[in-house]
Image (cartoon, rainbow, N blue to C red):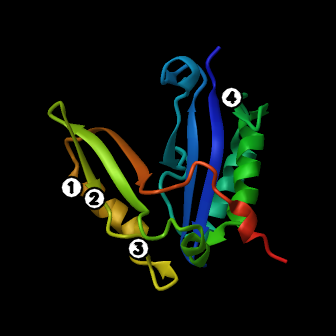
Amino acid sequence: MSYDISYRTLFITDGDQLLLLEETGPSNTYVGWGKHQKRARDWFVLGTPAFGRIFKKEAVLKALLHEVECTDYAEYIKINGKFVTRRNYFKLMHTRAKHAISVFDTFRLGIADTLRLRFSFYVDDEYAWVDSPPLFDAGRFAFDIREWYVTEMSKLKDAKYLTLQPTGYIPEKLKMGILKRR
């Protein structure tokens, strides 16, 4: 049986916009060889068919609650070694989104300078990508993420297999403990 595994999440907000990043991968795909073998995983911008790619904080929270209320089929996802239903997965994502870290915290973690968004896609069987400008500027998102997303999507009419992923440095062992509020 194949299932998805959610390894880590990183939700970033500036009070107005909310960026949902999740490191996830399938249970039956591995990279490496021998003692260096581990399950394949990658970072993605979280989105669902119901809310697609929205980035306004209040709209994202509302859409996540809508997913919790409307999800009735049992798709299982593994988080922290335990299987959870799709409904409980979205409850967890809603809770994490409410407690997203601030843009200032990304500077403290050392990821603010390198983090960007990347569209990757295929056009005429050729792999290509488009990177966003730097995400952060003076404690806020440097641009309207939704506007950038819509603009880039309109340019990619013939593209197939689109993915939206973060690029840049996200440490393997993200030290979230330094962000705990007192």
Of residues 135 and 19, the one nearer the viewer is 135
Q: Are marks 3 and 4 in contact (CB under 8 Å)?
A: no
Mark 2 and mark 3 lie on one chain; the one further toward the N terminus is 3
* Residue linked to disc 4: 75
Q: Residue at 47% x, 55% y: name it.
A: 53
Whether 174 is drawn above or below 110: the answer is above
Q: Are marks 1 and 2 in contact (CB under 8 Å)?
A: yes
* Extreme-right residue of the structure: 182
* Extreme-front residue of the structure: 35
Q: Amino acid at mark 2?
A: Glu
Q: Is residue 157 left or right of residue 120?
A: left
Callout 2: helix, strand or loop? helix
Q: CA distance from mark 4 to mark 1?
A: 34 Å
Q: CA distance from mark 3 to mark 1?
A: 17 Å
* Residue linked to disc 1: 155
Q: Residue at 41% x, 73% y: name it.
A: 144
Q: Are marks 3 and 1 in contact (CB under 8 Å)?
A: no
* Residue linked to disc 2: 152
Q: Residue at 52% x, 22% y: name it.
A: 30
- The spot of residue 122 in percent (x, y) is 23, 37
The 10 Å Cα crowd at callout 2, few under 14, some 14 to 19, many 20 or more, is some
